[in-house]
Image (cartoon, grey):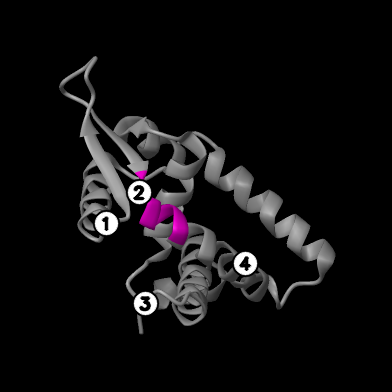
Amino acid sequence: MNAHNHDYELDMQIGHLLRRAYQRHTAIFQKEIADDRLTSVQFATMVAISQLGTAPLVQISHATAIDHATLRDIVARLKERGLLCVVQDKADRRQRLVSLSPEGEKLLQATIPAARAVTELTLAPLDACERIAALQVLKKLALEDI
């Protein structure tokens, strides 16, 4: 073992801990959500589209913090499943407007209660004060400009 690395404790590094927490959350999501083809990122995309209404990809990308290329793939997969409607913007032919299809709205509404349970299960090891603190710290870290 390299003597220079003895003072670097992996279990004390924020990136490592965030990744481990996200892995745990993802495992809970996959276990609790009835639709085994719906990922947490796809769900977040559908929630954002529901909140925005019909919106261009750039607006959805901003709302979800998902890069444009990745979002295009997510939208394509959800559209292929019949969960999204994608149309050309009549005002700007370069843009595509995305909305939930009736099937997408139905799946989203059916999934939201389980998604709430996922949040509760993810936060289960924390007491009430720790939950508030954790969410506030994560919001601050997530929303701070790089």
Q: Quadrant of residue 65?
A: top left
Asked if residue 96 lies left or right of residue 14, the reply is left
The numbered mark, 4 or 1, whose residue comes first in the sequence reads 1
SS of the residue under disc 2? loop
Q: Residue at x 52, y 72 (%)?
A: 25
The amino acid at mark 2 is Ser
Q: Is residue 102 magenta?
A: yes
Q: Residue at x 35, y 79 (%)?
A: 2
The numbered mark, 3 or 1, whose residue comes first in the sequence reads 3
The numbered mark, 3 or 2, whose residue comes first in the sequence reads 3
How many angstroms separate mark 4 from mark 2 (CA)?
A: 26 Å
Q: Main secondary structure of the magenta part?
A: helix
Q: Quadrant of residue 85?
A: top left
Return the residue at label 3. Answer: 36
Return the residue at label 1. Answer: 82
Asked if residue 13 lies left or right of residue 99, the reply is right
Magenta segment: 100-106
The image shows residue 138, relative to residue 118, as above or below, that is above
Q: Is residue 73 visible?
A: yes
The amino acid at mark 1 is Gly
SS of the residue under disc 3? loop
The mark closer to the camera, 3 or 2, is 2
The mark closer to the camera, 4 or 2, is 2
Q: Classify the position of the N terminus by image quarter.
A: bottom left
Q: Which label number is shown at residue 101?
A: 2
Return the residue at label 4. Answer: 119
The answer to whether marks 2 and 1 mark residues whose Cβ atoms lie closer than 8 Å is yes
